[in-house]
Image (cartoon, rainbow, N blue to C red):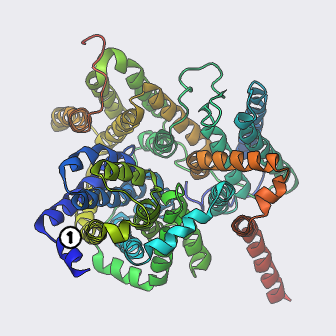
Amino acid sequence: MIEYLLQALTPFHIALALGGVIAGTVIGSLPGLTATMAVAVLVPITFTMPPASALILLGAIYTGAIYGGAYAAILLNTPGTPSAIATTFDGFPMAKRGDGDLAVTLACLASVVGGLVGALFLLLLAPPLADVALAFGSVEYFWLAIFGLTLIAALSKGNLLKGLIGACLGLLLSTVGVAEISADVRFTFGSEVLLGGIDVVSALIGLYCIPVLMDLVATSDKHLKVTHAPRGFRLLESLKISWRYKFNLVRSSVIGTLVGILPGAGGSIAGLVSYSEARRTSKNQGEFGKGAPEGVQATESANNATVGGGFIPTLVLGIPGTPPDAVILGALLIQGVRTGPNLFTGEGSIVYTFIFGLILATLLMLPTGLLIGRYAYRTIITVPKAMLVPTVAFMTIIGTYAIRNSISDVIIMIVLGVFAWILNRAGYSPSPIVLGLILGTIAEQGFVQAWTIGSATEDLMGMFFGRPISIAIVLFIVFTLSYPMLKAYLVRRKEKSHVA
Amino acid sequence: MSPEQGQGSQGIDLGGIIVAAALIVLGIVALWDTTNMADADSFVFPRMVAISMIGFCILFIALQMIAPSIGTNEEAGVVGGSSLRRIGLVTAMVLAALLMPWLGFLVSGALSFAAIMLLAMYDQWTPFRRLVFPVVGIVIVAGFYVIFAELLLVPLPVGSLFG
């Protein structure tokens, strides 16, 4: 092991890790540019490198991009990447009250801890944990997607039904275009614009960013209310908060790693599950959604932990855990590296050097993340509104266009944004809609496959409700949906007993 | 919108009901559209989702009629403000996208940037701002063009008028 560690610490690998983290963080911070895109765009650079070096660079870009998504989530209420959706819940309220610098530093610390936990799981427990991914069949993925949607609906406190309606709308929007399974054209109503479907990232930009821009341009109020002089990184304060909520940090990181192992689940579900757990177990439940540091911590540690978690099935089974993992897997195949159960024994020098490189990149994320975060925060609070609004609007247009080189996507993004602004007025949150769009494909594939098998075997009920993991997830769903009502009932009962 | 927003006020949630009613119509249209699909694999999932959405919307409206205090909402986002500027922003963005094939990315981007800058300007146009803001705007548009077109190799539209 020591030799692999030393291999990872060569000046060349340190430079690769540093460059990768910086590039990833910058790309991930731009709405529209996801971690997948960051990795995909920079993959060709790695073709001439040795496999371990290539992996270190790609891993560093990936981990940096996941963290970079937090900046736009905290400072603009627009998740830079889908995995930062839950970061907006408390990150943006913190920024609105003048604690954006604290939120950015907290997110950086949490991302580093999450990334380290994920990498340690990858280092120590990869082969046994990879079996977890194999235990999940189509029906389990369907229920997992539904679980993610019920979680986000339940997080819209007092608005469970609106959250569920939004989730259904998102799922329905995900079916627009050519069906993946049967190639039928669905819900396009003859329009060629809708033929390609609604791109998730375009929708994410529109649903989150356009309402913010529409409100920014409408008044002379400052974007973020900052009444005090710059307070530096606020690192000591962040460290104290992180230490106070250390269990939240570790729990969220472990959740992120475990969810990351499940192919397709990704950082958005990991962030939501850990956010929900953080809120459920917190003594300050009332603060969640109003700028609770624990919320930012939970999401950011979880989504960065999915990086290490996602590499477990990728390297051990050859099944990519997340979309960026799929790109990295492709790069590995080009390099001639065969992933599989024997990789850790047969190609130990590549795998272990990479894992130590990933740990190095995660540690380097602390200074680079803090510096870039501070710069991003100062830019957002000092730039005049007349420059900020057109710049962000311009970024949304170019970011959306770049995804599929499609002007139709830009129009869809703007239309969805206006729609989200109207929905916001009526109290419908964009988060369930976005998550419905993200999870729609997984949910549909799982549902249709399970439905087909269940119909063929004439045991639909058994297919959907008869498998142990499915039953466990369904129970979680029931608990998630009934928890707010149960809690309200218990509070009422407690109040009554006090009065009596 | 944060998860805590959109709750708390008393009385009937009219906005929520109107949106729910609109989504019932959307769900019915979606259900009707699934009748044109030949393969069961194509319609089984959207039908289930559309029916669920209609069911949740009906439940929401019914609950509002029976017990308006459950799940009521307060408005999210900025209340009031200039609607004209909002419409102007959306129009500038849509025009930028629509004109891109003709004017190209750089020209349509620069024009929309300038239009949105004017819409978002609440301070006085001092000589310094008149000089600096447009220059910075051009630098930002050109900078993004270089990043996307040259570094990330995104084929941005050149514009049929110039190409």
Position of A63 relative to A176 (above/below): below
Where residue A372 appears, as percent x and y from the top left, is 24, 60
Position of A87 relative to A181 (above/below): below
Q: Is residue A331 left or right of residue A73?
A: left
Residue B160 visible, this orientation: yes
> Dividing the picture into quarters, in which one does residue A94 lie?
bottom left
Furthest toward the top, the residue is B161
Residue at 47% x, 26% y is: A408
Q: Residues within 10 Å of mark 1 (few under 14, many from 20)?
A: many
Residue A223 visible, this orientation: no
Nearer the observer, B86 or A14: A14
Nearer the observer, A420 or B125: A420
Q: Is residue A232 left or right of residue A325?
A: left
Residue at 69% x, 56% y is: A139
Where residue B67 appears, as percent x and y from the top left, is 84, 57
The count of marks equals 1
Nearer the observer, A309 or A104: A309
What residue did someone put label 1 on? A8
Q: Is residue A272 left or right of residue A362?
A: right
| Quadrant of the drawing holding the C terminus of chain B | top left
Q: Mark 1: which amino acid?
A: Ala
Where residue A16 appears, as percent x and y from the top left, is 19, 60
Q: Is residue A108 left or right of residue A211?
A: left
- The chain identifier of the residue carrying mark 1 reads A
Where residue A380 appears, as percent x and y from the top left, is 31, 53
- Helix, strand or loop for disc 1: helix
Position of A27 relative to B81 (above/below): below
Residue at 30% x, 47% y is: A334
